[in-house]
Image (tube, rainbow, N blue to C red):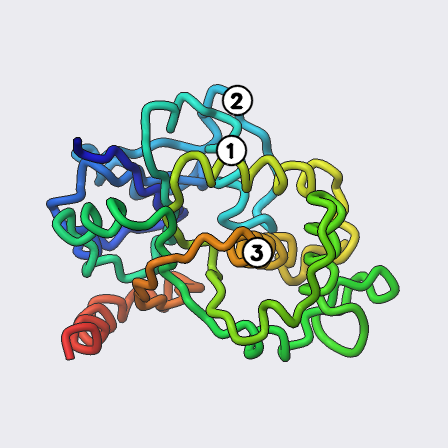
Amino acid sequence: MSLKYKLFVVFHNQLVLEYYDKSLINDYVFVNVNPNNPHIAEYKDFNIINQYELKKFHSLGKWYTESEVIYNVYKNPYLYEDLDYIGFLQYDIVSTPLRKNLIDPILAEHNHINFEPHLFQDDYTQNILMDIRFPNQLTGKGVNCYDAIIDDYNKYYHNCFTKDILYDKQINLCSSFVLSKGLFVEMMQFISGVIESGKLNKFDVNHNYRIQGGFLERYYAVWLVLKETQPYILKLIHLYEESNQQNKSLKLRIIQAMKRILR
């Protein structure tokens, strides 16, 4: 029996269509978050949805980054109720290596694909703060966001984990993954409570860092490790697009990225 899945790609400007192999084109859903995106008309042959037109759209604000889409997809189960797996990617991730004859066998054996693996200890030592004493400070000495996230996890699930269990683990960052539908729903039941509490808004009052999205990608990372999902690691290249000026040299970087992938 063939597995059914969709890969939701979050974008706000121009897509690089060379990133998406034709064998998966019917499995991609491109989610536009920008009501003024001038490029939408260029993608008539692709499965495009506008986030703000979903049946149940909840505006969180752009400082929630990709998690606004993940949350809104969760809140609109008609988008995934007939799926076995659901995935999320960002528009500036080189997804060219993904092909149906690669994804299908992986999903037959795994309930989680990690597209953005990072060592926990490397991210922990960035000292990203989640400390109410320093509400607008991104990094420094104080409550590390991971300690706060693990504490939230323990309170929700009545566990007593510490960061030590994560120390040598590869975590899944950048909100880029594929999960079985069951895992996705279970994770988002936890995450929705965090979002809807409004607590994340207390740590970046002026929205200087979009830290809500940064925290949430780490909430996913912690949850996926503590739930022992045993992911398949399929690292993709993330170009971290930040401006239209950068897009001018995008084609060159695609070629360079492809060369690195194929080495």
Q: Earlier in the sequence, mark 1 or mark 2?
A: 2
Q: Quadrant of the N terminus?
A: top left
> For mark 2, does the 10 Å Cα neighbourhood hold few (<14), some (14 to 19), or many (20 or more) residues?
some
Most foreground residue, 77 or 204: 77
Where is mark 3, residue-wise?
Answer: 226
Q: Position of residue 17 (x, y in %)?
A: 20, 51
The C terminus, quarter of image: bottom left
Residue 41 appears anywhere in the view: yes
Q: Tag 3: Cα neighbours inside 10 Å, few (<14), some, or many (≥20)?
A: few
Q: Are marks 1 and 2 in contact (CB under 8 Å)?
A: yes
The secondary element bearing badge 3 is classed as helix
Task: Mark 2 and mark 3 in contact? Answer it, CB < 8 Å.
Answer: no
Which mark, by number, is residue 56?
Answer: 2
Q: Which residue is mark 1?
A: 72
Q: Residue 111, image x and y in percent?
A: 36, 46
- The kind of residue on which mark 2 rests is Lys
Q: Residue at x 32, y 40 (%)?
A: 30
Q: Sequence-wise, which precedes: disc 1 or disc 3?
A: 1
| Residue at mark 1 to residue at mark 3: CA–CA distance | 24 Å
Residue drawn at (70%, 65%), measured in percent from left and top? 162
